[in-house]
Image (tube, grey):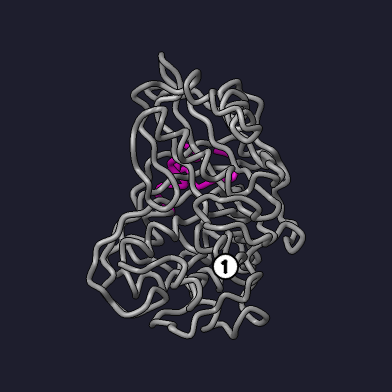
Amino acid sequence: MRGFDPKYADLPDFILKVTREIWETRRVHTLREHYASDIKVRSPASLVIGNESVIAATLATQAEFPDRELLGEDVIWSGSPEEGMLSSHRILSVGTHSHDGSYGRATGRKVGYRVIADCHARNNCIDDEWIIRDQGAIVRQLGRDPVEYTRHVIESEGGPEACVRPFLPEADVAGPYSGRGNDNEWGEKYAEILRRIMACDLSVCSSEYDRACRLEYATGASGSSRDFATRFWMGLRASLPSAEFTIDHQIGREDPLMPPRAALRWSLRGRHDGWGPFGAPTGADVYLMGMSHAEFGQWGLRREYALYDEVAVWKQILMHTGGVSDRARSGTSPSGGGESP
């Protein structure tokens, strides 16, 4: 790959090896080599600028989960070494909550959760990033209620008026990547499925999903069948029925020994004006960043992974309602370790 160290065979090889080097072999200092000094990292929790902030977040997360492994499940990518490449890296992160940190007092519990990180890479360096960690899955596995946890986060940051604001597009800072992916047919097929779902045509789950589809969703929800897909997507849309749905980035790929795949980054923006996984309607303005991967087979969509950050959504709702509990428990902000995989 032009501009990259010859030890990397291709972009997936670069992403997988760099991830392991930084977060598993504990060579955290190599973030200064592999991440641009002014990198922009966007997560639902916040916008972070600069690799020194990423290093600090990485150290905090590693201290709290010292045995953490980042198992790279797939890298779906587009672009070229000359123009820059965008990788959508899906990770299964596993570890033990061994020390006190952003998730509160050490519980000794083992956790497993997914992350999707979209990274722009050129000249042997990552210089733009969008990332979602399944915070809802982490909090639940540690035995905490996501709403109460979010209330404590807001309190610990100074209350609804002073707390760290979740990421919003208007607060973004332009980075070097402005692409929208590629026009591969599998990316377009998956995009059309989500467009139909968000237009309230849930019959698409019956017509386009394999009967035996395997599904991994936000909050650690895991299941199979078309009905499971329908319930997840219907619940999300029911919470934000009037929100505008946008596909912000789209990739499709066909690679040897792999099924046809797609990676989408998408968003919902509007009022919390419906019943669903976020409870009774509050009228809160919500921006929900989502990322999804899909694999296709002979009988339709056979595997799907869809993530959003439940805590970031609850934070926006509670900031709107002022619903801050005086029963805060130990733990601080989820944004403390939120900018590293």
* Residue furthest top as drawn: 298
Residue at the image position 74 percent from the left and 61 percent from the top: 173
Q: Position of residue 252 (x, y in %)?
A: 56, 28
The residue type indicated by label 1 comes to Lys
Viewer-closest of 66 and 237 = 237
Viewer-closest of 27 and 111 = 111
- Numbered disc 1: secondary structure: helix
Residue at the image position 53 percent from the left and 50 percent from the top: 276
The answer to whether residue 4 is magenta is yes
Query: Which quadrant would residue 225 be assigned to in this image?
Result: top left
Query: Which quadrant would residue 43 be assigned to in this image?
Result: bottom right
The answer to whether residue 217 is magenta is no
Q: Position of residue 127 (x, y in %)?
A: 62, 56
141 in relation to 333, above or below: above
Residue denoted by label 1: 315
Q: Is residue 240 visible?
A: yes
Viewer-closest of 116 and 70 = 116
Q: Position of residue 292 (x, y in %)?
A: 52, 40
Segment colored magenta: 1-18
